[in-house]
């Protein structure tokens, strides 16, 4: 557990408003998960446009991108995450462990992101539309 937490802290370090202190409540507003996704696929998440107070919107985006682009479906719903002080720890650890397994040997891209595919462009357009 400690190694998993440390890995996530390293991956999200330096992202505005993100402080991963645990594997449960630190993920509730969606910013940490969006930061992780942005670190590996900056073409899919416009992190600078995210706002902490729009936690449910951030989670919807993160869950959508995680499932569509990384093949990792959510184990909790946005509503379940939003309705509790601390999300279920077993579900969160199982969910987050999938990212660790998938990404631990993949270095994040250096510099600018690759040109988004048409599918990625749709996701980005949908994200921008949801922010309006």
Image: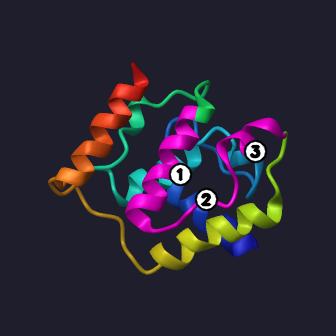
Residue numbers of the magenta segment: 57-84
The residue identified by callout 3 is 80
Residue found at x 43% / y 53% = 65
**Element assignment for label 1:** helix
Question: Does residue 55 show up magenta in the picture?
Answer: no
* In this view, 91 is above or below 49: below
**Left or right placement of residue 43 versus residue 82 in this view:** left
The residue identified by callout 1 is 63
**Left or right placement of residue 83 versus residue 104 in this view:** right
* In this view, 51 is above or below 63: above
Quadrant hosting residue 106: bottom left
Sequence-earlier tag: 1 or 3:
1
Q: Do the residues labelled 2 and 1 touch (CB within 8 Å)?
A: yes
The residue identified by callout 2 is 74
Q: Does residue 13 appear in the picture of this structure? A: no
**Left or right placement of residue 52 versus residue 125 in this view:** right
């Amino acid at each position: 557990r400690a190694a998993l937490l440390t890995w996530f802290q390293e991956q999200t370090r330096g992202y505005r408003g993100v402080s991963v202190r645990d594997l449960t409540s630190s993920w509730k507003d969606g910013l940490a998960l969006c930061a992780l996704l942005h670190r590996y696929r900056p073409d899919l998440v416009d992190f600078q446009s995210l706002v902490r107070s729009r936690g449910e919107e951030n989670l919807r985006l993160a869950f959508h991108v995680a499932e569509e682009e990384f093949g990792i479906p959510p184990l909790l719903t946005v509503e379940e995450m939003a309705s509790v002080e601390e999300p279920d720890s077993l579900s969160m650890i199982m969910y987050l462990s999938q990212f660790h397994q998938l990404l631990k040997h993949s270095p994040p891209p250096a510099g600018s992101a690759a040109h988004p595919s048409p599918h990625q462009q749709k996701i980005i357009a949908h994200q921008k539309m949801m922010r309006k």
